[in-house]
Amino acid sequence: MQCNHILQTKQSIFHSFFFSKISKMGSLPHLPNGVSPKQSLNDLIDETTLTDLFKSQQNHLNFFFDRIDHSQTLSFTRALLNTTGTVFFTGVGKSGFVAHKISQTLVSLGIRSSFLSPVDALHGDIGILSDSDVLVLLSKSGATEELLRLVPCARAKGARLIAVTSVEGNALSAVCDMTVHLPLERELCPFNLAPVTSTAIQMVFGDTVAIALMAARNLTKDEYAANHPAGKIGKSLIFKVRDVMKKDEELPICRESDLIMDQLVELTSKGCGCLLVIDDNRRLIGTFTDGDLRRTLKASGEAIFKLTVGKMCNRNPRTIGPDAMAVDAMKKMEAPPSPVQFLPVIDDDNVVIGIVTLHGLVSAGL
């Protein structure tokens, strides 16, 4: 009886503790007004509603495109182009995220740019500003207190101040050296509060100006690639065959007089799926693949033990030079009449200096 009493007491304590936690955590996810727990939340949105939202956002964006002042945009773009220092962007909240993104886009194009936190700026970071810099302040309302407090401090450093806002006659524009108005009909938000359209036009504006600067600076594809060495774009424009090829001890080398069966280890151990058949001067004679091995075994049977690599190799393989672009090597592998998995790399004298494989190209991120 005493044991049962103790067990009941423990259960009572547990239940009291559990339900007190639940009450502190709150109720289950709130259902919209008029929706019963049995009704699926999926029923609250349909394709027509979603389509209408996209059309509304498109209309709001078209309002921006139809009314933007291109003379202001040109002045803004030239101001950034002629800056001898750094182009700083700043903003608060969602506008701050957009400001940071635009700055990073400029950096990727080789333009000196950085994001300056308006809060951190007032606690020491403003020391980075100089009289050769431009500070672009993004704000939908132009009434952001943090930016208004930053203005006199940035002006004291001699930086040129440019306000990018969407409300005409705002306080921020009045205290800056230049202003750009981004026309905003309204936010897509039903309450006209969530910044989902204003931030979209800020991003479109900033990225379009970035491309205008890219064209004005005559940025080449090679220069762009140099700023993206780790990405697929950069690798496809930077990497050459010599950067991704196997060489020296990694090469599956054999002579044409070698017996096929004596070269099985070399064929399978180097991870290339082939043998590079060379002469005494390392000039390429041909290639012998694992596919050639299967076909030879099927056609010759036991006679394969007496066959040499030179007798069965392909004496007209596709090849490539070490200074060719790696992406061109991949295209050559995939070219008709049938794709191949590797290309011998040879110099101008037909001497084998490496091998590039499809697996190696993919592993390199191409």
Image (cartoon, grey):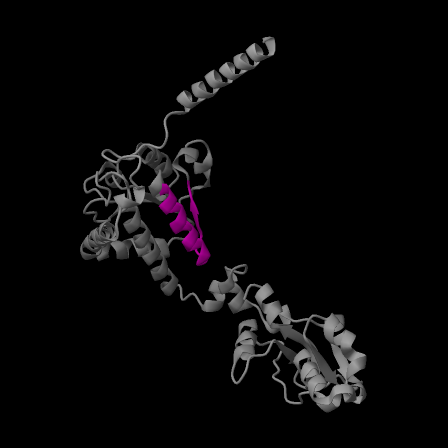
Count the numbered circles shown. 0
Residue 208 sits above or below residue 95 on the image: below
Which segment is the magenta one?
96-116
Position of residue 188 in the picture relative to residue 100 (left or right): left
Tell me the residue at 47%/63% (across/down). 224
- The percent coordinates of residue 245 (x first, y second) are 65, 71
Looking at the rendered image, the quarter that the N terminus falls into is top right
Name the foreground residue: 285 vs 275. Answer: 275
The answer to whether any part of residue 288 appears in the image is: no
The answer to whether any part of residue 223 appears in the image is: yes
Q: From this viewpoint, which residue is outermost toward the front?
A: 1
Q: From this viewpoint, which residue is outermost toward the top?
A: 2
Name the foreground residue: 129 vs 101. Answer: 101
Name the foreground residue: 44 vs 342. Answer: 44
- The percent coordinates of residue 114 (x first, y second) are 44, 47
Q: Is residue 317 magenta?
A: no
- The percent coordinates of residue 223 (x first, y second) are 48, 65
Tell me the residue at 60%/64% (across/down). 363
Tell me the residue at 37%/46% (across/down). 99
Tell me the residue at 47%/21% (across/down). 18
> Of helix, strand and loop, which mostly describes the magenta segment?
helix
Residue 146 sits above or below residue 333 on the image: above
Position of residue 92 in the picture relative to residue 303 (left or right): left
Position of residue 195 in the picture relative to residue 321 (left or right): left
